[in-house]
């Protein structure tokens, strides 16, 4: 593997570093907790990043992006430098990171022009209507129905674990529109305005104390057929495009690198038994083990980058990213909490709780991500069966009612 960057790429890195240093004061504070309040500083920062080609870089200019040619190495440099500077990369989340690339690949021209620009600017917030009470990891079992009446799709059903639904203006959802089609067919991908009559959102508080998730009910919700992405009944293929971007986002190596550096700083700055936590042999040993895993994740990301540059399918290598990344991030947060000593158990309250609150939140949030976006157990089955070609997990036998 060639690990050296070209002269042009190194020149880009120097230019980016200068930009970050000169504009550090303009960057918004990186907030921990989700909020429905649009931060003007974040929107201004996003606009500045797009103008300089550091955000929405691959999104065409006619849709509000920077319009630069795709270059995975440039994208990697941007991720590395923002993580090193510990500055916000601007707008992120389900809309920009998951829906926008899906629409650019599968959406109509009208859908791209209507939805991509405000999403890229951070003015339109999206939520994802995939999971249901009986269809989480087995997503194709979804039961939310959509029947066609004239030029309208009428939706009935329920979604759950819907992040940011209480704040979002729009949802991208999966709906079963062809009742008699096979399990993975008959599913359509639809864009749903959240202010449509018949939608009820009920926030669900998690162990972080925040209502990060919601359950959403659809009662005769009427959506124009023009809001279907692609053709009716072909939403599973489109949904998997979104899922691919989601798993890459949740298991990002740059996130792990940033958390590792932050955990190491916490261990340098906090004392255990009168000495910096970094000098504690047990804690230092755990840090070194996690450093090795972080470097492995970074090298694995380079491997995936090589596949991308060559136009090759990542295969099983692409399936392990989320599984390893989310577990690593969880373990890093746990180490930081232990390095804080007694203060590490504090959560919102007390003179020393600010640092502890941040790590406690990361710890609980990352535990949720081990489950969300496809549980670790399901991910292992996918890796074994689809990636390694191993036999499918045995299914429980169905009892014979006539057997004695």
Image (cartoon, helix red, strand yellow):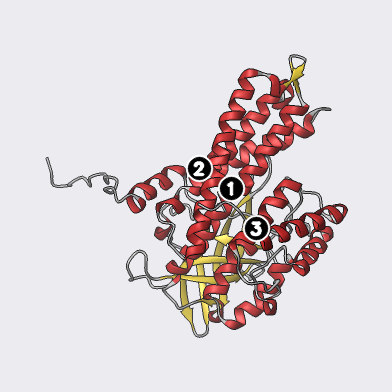
Secondary structure found at label 3? loop
Q: Which mark is residue 324?
A: 2
Image-based side of 170 in relation to 147, left or right: right
**Residue at 55% of width from left, 49% of height from top?**
251
**Residue at 75% of width from left, 53% of height from top?**
88
Residue 118, percent from left and from top: 71, 71
Pointer 1 residue: 253
Query: Which circle's residue, 3 or 1, is located before the other in the chain?
Result: 3
Front in this rendered view, residue 85 or 18: 18
Residue 346, percent from left and from top: 73, 28
Residue 4, percent from left and from top: 60, 53
Query: Which circle's residue, 2 or 3, is located before the other in the chain?
Result: 3
For marks 2 and 3, give the CA distance. Answer: 20 Å
Task: Name, please, the residue furthest toward the front.
Answer: 7
> Which of label 2 and label 3 is nearer to you?
2
**In the figure, 369 relative to 76: above or below?**
above
> Which of label 2 and label 1 is nearer to you?
1
Task: Name, please, the residue furthest toward the left.
Answer: 404
Front in this rendered view, residue 101 or 171: 101
For marks 2 and 1, give the CA distance. Answer: 10 Å
Q: Residues within 10 Å of mark 2 (few under 14, many from 20)?
A: some
Pointer 3 residue: 93
**Residue at 77% of width from left, 54% of height from top?**
17
Q: Residues within 10 Å of mark 3 (few under 14, many from 20)?
A: some
Q: Residues within 10 Å of mark 1 (few under 14, many from 20)?
A: many
């Amino acid at each position: 593997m060639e690990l050296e960057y070209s002269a042009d790429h190194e020149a880009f890195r120097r230019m980016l570093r200068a930009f970050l240093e000169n504009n550090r004061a303009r960057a918004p504070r990186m907030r921990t907790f989700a909020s429905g309040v649009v931060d003007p500083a974040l929107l201004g920062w996003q606009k500045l990043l797009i103008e300089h080609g550091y955000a929405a870089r691959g999104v065409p200019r006619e849709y509000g992006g920077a319009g630069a040619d795709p270059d995975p190495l440039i994208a990697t440099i941007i991720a590395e430098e923002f993580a090193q500077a510990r500055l916000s990369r601007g707008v992120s989340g389900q809309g920009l990171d998951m829906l926008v690339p899906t629409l650019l690949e599968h959406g109509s021209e009208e859908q791209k022009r209507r939805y991509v620009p405000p999403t890229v600017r951070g003015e339109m917030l999206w939520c994802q209507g995939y999971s249901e009470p009986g269809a989480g990891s087995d997503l194709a079992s979804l039961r939310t129905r959509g029947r066609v009446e004239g030029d309208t799709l009428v939706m009935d059903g329920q979604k759950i674990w819907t992040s940011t639904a209480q704040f979002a203006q729009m949802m991208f959802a999966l709906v079963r529109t062809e009742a008699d089609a096979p399990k993975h067919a008959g599913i359509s991908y639809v864009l749903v305005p959240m202010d449509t009559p018949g939608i009820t959102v009920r926030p669900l508080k998690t162990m972080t104390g925040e209502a990060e998730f919601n359950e959403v009910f659809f009662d005769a919700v009427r959506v124009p057929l023009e809001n279907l992405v692609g053709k009716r009944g072909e939403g599973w293929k489109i949904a998997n495009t979104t899922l691919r971007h989601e798993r890459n986002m949740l298991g990002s190596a740059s996130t792990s690198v940033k958390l590792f550096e932050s955990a190491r700083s916490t261990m340098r700055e906090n004392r255990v038994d009168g000495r910096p936590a970094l000098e504690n042999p047990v804690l230092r040993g755990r840090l070194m083990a996690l450093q090795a895993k972080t470097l492995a994740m970074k090298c694995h990301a380079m491997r995936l980058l090589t596949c991308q540059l060559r136009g090759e399918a990542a295969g099983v290598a692409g399936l392990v990213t989320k599984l390893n990344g989310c577990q690593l991030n969880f373990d890093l947060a746990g180490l930081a909490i232990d390095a804080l000593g007694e203060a590490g158990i504090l959560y919102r309250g007390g003179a020393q709780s600010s640092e502890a609150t941040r790590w406690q939140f990361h710890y609980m949030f990352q535990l949720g991500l081990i489950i969300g976006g496809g549980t670790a157990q399901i991910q292992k089955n996918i890796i074994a069966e689809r990636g390694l070609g191993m036999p499918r997990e045995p299914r429980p036998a169905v009892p014979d009612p006539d057997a004695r």
